[in-house]
Image (tube, rainbow, N blue to C red):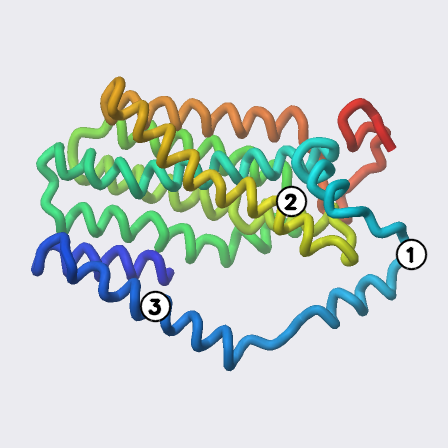
């Protein structure tokens, strides 16, 4: 919701005062507020994880190198989550980088571009209230797979659309798809990782997930320069759909109440 508000606010500032410097002032204020809240209001939570670890059977503590390999590749669910997280943020970076240029180039007023940019995170934020709870009932794998496919459809509608309403609908689809994926991926990682090394696993997952922003900017920018913005957007849509296929094929269900013992949770049936 904060991202949605920021998109509306900066869109208004850009339309009223120009692209620089006014739209950057809220970002400076938000960063300062975040630092202050982190310093004075956020409480340490490590003891909660320690208590959870003490309540479960003792296990050997893996090294960070083992956690890195396990989360990035060896465990099928963690690998599927890591690649889906990267592609999710890859297309998110493309959306924020190319879609406003694409819409403005199509003649859409900056105010309408701001509305479309705000609807995406707004729908995403509100929908997470439901999707996070639904993943606790329906499981993680199905939610992630469907979410990636809905994102791909939303990006495709952006490419094929010709006016404000289809593009607004595409923004709604992107928001729904991302809401299905975002909390569920973190939940899946937490399902698999034990309390003693959960934060390390989340850190590795976030390395891949947030690295998607950089990869998305570089890949979509290079494709846009070489083949045009519509081609770049279509290529990212195809990649997003493929990521959902990987989740559907590779990932095992991680929700504890639905998880079944399988001999090959790691590639090659290792351990």
As measured in the structure, the alpha-carbon distance from the residue carrying label 2 to the one carrying label 3 is 36 Å
The N terminus: image quadrant: bottom left
Say few, some or many: other residues with alpha carbon within 10 Å of mark 3 (under 14 / 14 to 19 / 20 or more). Answer: few
Q: Residue at x 36, y 62 (%)?
A: 2
Examine the rendered structure and indicate whether residue 196 appears above or below residue 105: below
Residue for point 12% across, 32% down:
106
Residue corresponding to mark 1? 58
Sequence-earlier tag: 2 or 3: 3
- Report, in whole angstroms, how far the alpha carbon at label 1 lies from the one at label 3: 42 Å
Q: Which mark is residue 30?
A: 3
Marks 2 and 1 sit apart, C-alpha to C-alpha, by: 29 Å
Closer to the chain start, of discs 2 and 1, is 1
What element does badge 3 sit on? helix
- Dot 2 falls on a residue whose secondary structure is helix
**Label 1: how many Cα within 10 Å (few below 14, some 14–19, many 20+):** few
Q: Position of residue 65 (x, y in %)?
A: 73, 42
Q: Which residue is mark 2?
A: 138
């Amino acid at each position: 919701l904060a991202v949605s508000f920021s998109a509306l606010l900066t869109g208004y500032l850009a339309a009223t005062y120009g692209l620089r410097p006014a739209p950057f002032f809220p970002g400076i204020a938000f960063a300062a507020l975040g630092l202050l809240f982190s310093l004075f209001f956020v409480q340490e939570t490590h003891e909660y994880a320690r208590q959870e670890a003490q309540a479960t059977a003792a296990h050997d503590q893996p090294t960070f190198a083992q956690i890195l390999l396990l989360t990035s590749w060896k465990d099928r669910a963690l690998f599927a989550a890591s690649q889906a997280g990267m592609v999710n943020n890859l297309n998110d970076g493309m959306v924020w980088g190319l879609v406003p240029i694409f819409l403005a180039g199509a003649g859409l007023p900056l105010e309408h571009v701001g509305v479309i940019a705000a609807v995406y995170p707004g729908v995403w934020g509100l929908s997470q209230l439901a999707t996070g709870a639904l993943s606790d009932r329906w499981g993680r794998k199905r939610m992630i797979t469907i979410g990636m496919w809905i994102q791909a459809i939303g990006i495709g509608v952006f490419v094929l659309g010709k006016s404000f309403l289809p593009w607004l609908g595409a923004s709604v689809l992107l928001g729904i798809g991302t809401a299905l994926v975002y909390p569920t991926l973190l939940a899946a990682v937490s399902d698999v990782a034990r309390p003693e090394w959960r934060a390390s696993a989340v850190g590795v997952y976030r390395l891949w997930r947030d690295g998607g922003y950089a990869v998305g900017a570089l890949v979509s920018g290079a494709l846009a320069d070489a083949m045009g913005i519509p081609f770049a957007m279509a290529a990212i849509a195809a990649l997003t759909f493929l990521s959902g296929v990987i989740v559907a094929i590779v990932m095992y269900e991680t929700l504890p109440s639905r998880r079944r013992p399988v001999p090959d949770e790691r590639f090659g049936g290792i351990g």
